[in-house]
Amino acid sequence: DIQMTQSPSSLSALVGDRVTITCRASQSIDTYINWYQLKPGTAPRLLIYAASNLHSGVPSRFSGTGSGTDFTLIINRLEPEDFATYFCQQSYTIPRTFGQGTRVEVK
Amino acid sequence: QMQLQESGPRLVKPSETLSLICSVSGGPIISNSYSWAWIRQPPGKGLEWIGSVYQSGTTHFNPSLMSRVAISADTSRNQVSLKLTSATAADTALYYCARLAWIVRDMADAFDMWGLGTKVIVS
C-alpha cells in the first residue's frame, strides 16, 4: 500500500493567515492526489483533485501543488469557515489511501 | 444536484454482519462518469477506503477487508449497499458513501460527492 504522510497533524492559525499542509507519498504517485475538507456533522468536501485542480465551487484561496512524492495544500487568507480537518488521498493505485489528517484550529 | 444518504443499524453485535445502504437521489447511480465507494473513519482516526463498485459491476476492495466485504449497486432502487461480515469492535466507525468521479482530462478520479455518514458501533 502507498503510505500518505501528512504534516503537521495539527496547527493553530488566525483568520487571515496563510496555511500550508504537506503530504508525502511513500512512492511516486505522479499528480494523482486529492485533498478533502472534513467538518463534524457535514459531508466531506473535495477541494483539489489531480494535485492542483480546484474542484467546482471551491474558493480560489485554496490551491494545491506538487508531483511525484511531495505535495502541498495552501489556504491563502484563512476564513472562519476553513477551521476543519484536511486529508490528502492518493488515486494512483488500489487500495486508495489517505493521509492521517491535519486539524486546523483557531489560535 | 445529487444527494447521498447512508442508513442502517447503529448497533451491530460482534460476529454479525454490518449492512448499510446508500440512497442516491437526483440522478442515476449508473453512469460512464462515476462509480461508488464506501469509506469509513474510526473514532479518533483517519479515513479508510473500504471499496468501490463500478458501472460494469466490477468491485475493488481494500485488501485488509477483502475477505469480509461486499459492495453492490441496485439500479432499481438507486442504492449502493455495503455488507461487512464477522464484525468486530475494530469496525466501529463513521461510514461514508461517496461518489467516485472520473476526470477524463486528467485520467484521474476523486471522491467528489459524499453523504453525511452514519455511525456504526459494534458492541
Image (spheres, rainbow, N blue to C red):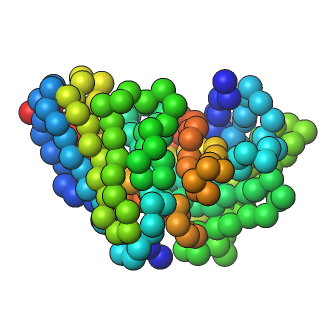
**Total number of numbered labels?**
0
Q: Nearer the viewer, residue A49 or A82?
A: A49
Residue B102 is left or right of residue A13, and the answer is right
x and y percentages locating residue B115 in the rendered image = 57, 36
x and y percentages locating residue B57 in the rendered image = 82, 59
Residue drawn at the location 85% of the way across and 37% of the way down: B77
Residue drawn at the location 38% of the way across and 68% of the way down: A68
x and y percentages locating residue B44 in the rendered image = 33, 52
Vertical side of A73 occupied by B71: above or below? below
Vertical side of B55 occupied by B84: above or below? below
Residue B78 is left or right of residue B42, and the answer is right
Vertical side of A72 occupied by A47: above or below? above
Q: Residue furthest left?
A: A107
Residue drawn at the location 73% of the way across and 57% of the way down: B53
Tell me where residue B2 sits by quadrant: top right
Q: Quadrant of the N terminus of chain B?
A: top right
Residue drawn at the location 34% of the way across and 58% of the way down: A66
Q: Nearer the viewer, residue A53 or A103?
A: A53
x and y percentages locating residue B46 in the rendered image = 38, 55
Answer yes or no: is residue B8 visible: no
Answer yes or no: is residue A1 visible: yes
Q: Residue furthest right?
A: B76
Vertical side of B13 occupied by A43: above or below? above
